[in-house]
Image: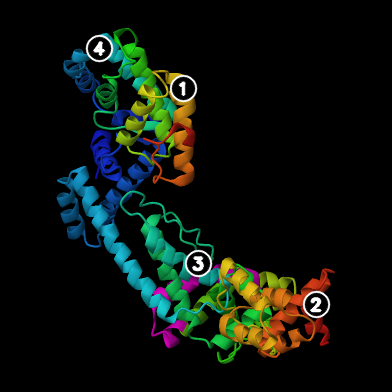
Amino acid sequence: MKFSEEELLQVVAKRVRKYTSNESTSVTYQTARQILSSVLYCIQEVDFDVSHATAYEESYELSEGNNNLTAMKAFEIGLNKKKDKIKRAKKLFASLCVRFEDYHNDCYRETIIDGMKAFFERYDVDFDATNHLLTLDYPLICEVKNIQGIDLIYEYLYRTSLEQEFLGYFSKEEVEKILIAYHRDYSGLIINIASIVLRNSLGRLLTKQDLNCLSIGEMQRIEIEELFQDKEQDKIRQILNDTLQSFVMEQFKGDICLFEYLKKDINEIAYVLMLGIKQHSLQQVLIEVKDPKSIQEKKYREGGSMEDEALRELIEVMKKQSLEARIELIKKRVKSLSDLKELLQECFYQEECNRVFALLSDEERNVLIEEIKKKLDFDEALYEWEERLIYKI
Amino acid sequence: MEEKQLFELMMSNGKEQLQKVIKCNSYTNKFGLSLSSKEALQLLDSRKNSLRQEERVEFGEGILSKIIYEFCDSPFIYQDNYVDTLEGLQEIFYIYKNEALDEVTDDELLSYMKECFNGKCQGDLDYLEGSCLDAFCRKIRSEGIGFIGAGEEENEI
């Protein structure tokens, strides 16, 4: 569909008047640009129908129908389609949230749960449709490119749901063991979890191991090395493809979409396997879980911290209370270690700290001790309560 | 087509604009003010330049007619300074729409401009631009639209 500049600008002019509620006769270039982009984005949606119609007859009918459309009508149809897409994206997000597992990775949780909520609250399909607002920091197996706005968000959510479907096959504990073995502080890293799990799961399948565990030991690495040693990358890729296909056919009822999506990582996996074999560093590519105890520390999850003002108020109140009263207040009001640390610094002295330590779970205690150890590594001075905890005074 | 050219294409037909500005004469005549076609064209040219400079796009009939209707009864405007004052007010209007981050409507800004122009500025465009509107927009940027300076005491600004 082709519209003249004058036709398009008439649509933009009308949209600008709506944007300003007829209360301004002018807008900035930036605003005009934004509204123009929104109009073109919506009109493209109608063009898309024509170019992506599957049957010749369908395409002809759409094209014929669309040739009679004015720019304004095309825009209105396109806008309605985008609004429908927002509804579908919300449904997809809602179903994703039900079973979403972030494996304690901050970036994953913040991008999907926090980020998407904010997107649906603030996305302006009427006047800023191409602005998808989010930086989408969490990297997918295959990044979404060359699309904008709600189209991008929908596709991102769809790919996330595929990755979650794949990850859901494995036990949460096994996935977390692999991640900890990959990097102790994986929670704070920006990594794609599905890719790490996919590599190891393919390694297990190639060596005929079950998938109740994801770890790849030395024997399996040697086996894989022997399997791929003299093969070109193309051949490695083919073997990985076939293995993945069989796995998805059997365990995911032949879900073609899932297979086609996971397949996008095969090139990369083939390349790093080949490199790992050449450089005798396959243990960097296929992860071995060596320290089962390390999973314990990662079960701790920080609760909600108080607002600064509320915390200050609590400190002032506690300073005037007896030890027993202060302990009761900790039990009732404190849900996060960061708040507890502030209170230990300000409101507890000498042996009193030990009464607070007695309230901690093993996980909480371990987290605090690890933080204190890091301070010691950097020669930082410790607070009194920190010295008591680490040196068990 | 370059963006600026595209946005300039958005602006109303020149002939239409001219007619609308000339039409204002039927009202402003009672205040002893009128514009010739040449003067009206000069103002419309000045409008284009100001919009380009301030990177704004105007739709419909634009703000010039509104400025004329709003200020024609000012005691500080007479036939000799009519065109220059309108040109100045138009330019100031676009500058301060930007400065106020489009947080004020056209009517709100014009109303405040008129109050200051006729009041503390005593018809001085430089004082209007450099002092009153500057403070007005700073207040809007920091306190939001809840603050509209019209009617406030001088010492509060």
Tell me what residue is drawn at x 41 percent, y 43 percent: B147
Quadrant hosting residue A295: bottom right
Q: Label 3 to label 1, Cα distance in Å? A: 50 Å
- Chain ID, mark 1: B
Proximity of marks 3 and 2: CB atoms separated by less than 8 Å: no
CA neighbours of label 4 inside 10 A, class few (<14), some (14 to 19), many (20+): some
Proximity of marks 4 and 1: CB atoms separated by less than 8 Å: no
**Left or right side of A108 for A59:** left
Tell me what residue is drawn at x 38 percent, y 62 percent: A121
Amino acid at pointer 2? Glu
For marks 3 and 1, give the one nearer the viewer.
1
Where residue A186 appears, as percent x and y from the top left, is 64, 74
- Identify the residue under disc 1: B127
Amino acid at pointer 3? Thr
Q: Quadrant of the N terminus of chain A?
A: top left
Q: Quadrant of the C terminus of chain A?
A: bottom right
Q: Label 2 to label 1, Cα distance in Å? A: 62 Å
Amino acid at pointer 4? Leu
Q: Relative to A22, is B28 above or below?
A: above
Where residue B55 appears, as percent x and y from the top left, is 42, 31
Q: Which mark is residue A111?
A: 3
- Identify the residue under disc 2: A384
Q: Which residues are magenta?
A: A248-273
